[in-house]
Image (cartoon, rainbow, N blue to C red):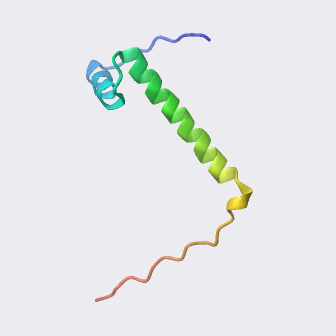
Amino acid sequence: MAKVTVTLDAELVVEVMVLAGAGSPQDAVELVVRDYIARGHRTEARVASPDEQRAPVEPAPQDQG
């Protein structure tokens, strides 16, 4: 697999490392990117699923008082 070098703000990377629980900047950014891609695939699968034909949700009436 090809590798890419990206320059990021150090504070951003440190925050990602803390949130991801990763020990290195490389691992932290890779975890975030992989999670982002996985979420996209889950969303695509859910939207494309024909067996989830649900009735439209009507908004609840709001109290006027």
Q: Is residue 45 left or right of residue 15?
A: right
- Residue 60 at x, y percent in the picture: 45, 79
- Is residue 9 visible in the rendered image? The answer is yes
Q: Relative to residue 25, is residue 59 depicted above or below? A: below
Q: Residue furthest right?
A: 50
- Residue 62 at x, y percent in the picture: 38, 82
- Residue 54 at x, y percent in the picture: 65, 68
Task: Please identify the quadrant where the N terminus is shown.
Answer: top right
Q: Residue at x 33, y 17 (%)?
A: 23
Q: Residue at x 53, y 77 (%)?
A: 58
Q: Relative to residue 60, is residue 25 depicted above or below? A: above
- Is residue 7 visible in the rendered image? The answer is no
Q: Residue at x 49, y 33 (%)?
A: 35
Q: Is residue 43 left or right of residue 12?
A: right
- Which sits in the foreground, 62 or 27? 27
Q: Number of labelled discs?
A: 0
Res. 52 image quadrant:
bottom right
Q: Residue furthest bottom?
A: 65
Q: Residue at x 70, y 53 (%)?
A: 49
Task: Please identify the quadrant where the C terminus is shown.
Answer: bottom left
Q: Relative to residue 59, is residue 54 depicted above or below? A: above
- Residue 37 at x, y percent in the picture: 55, 33
Res. 29 image quadrant:
top left
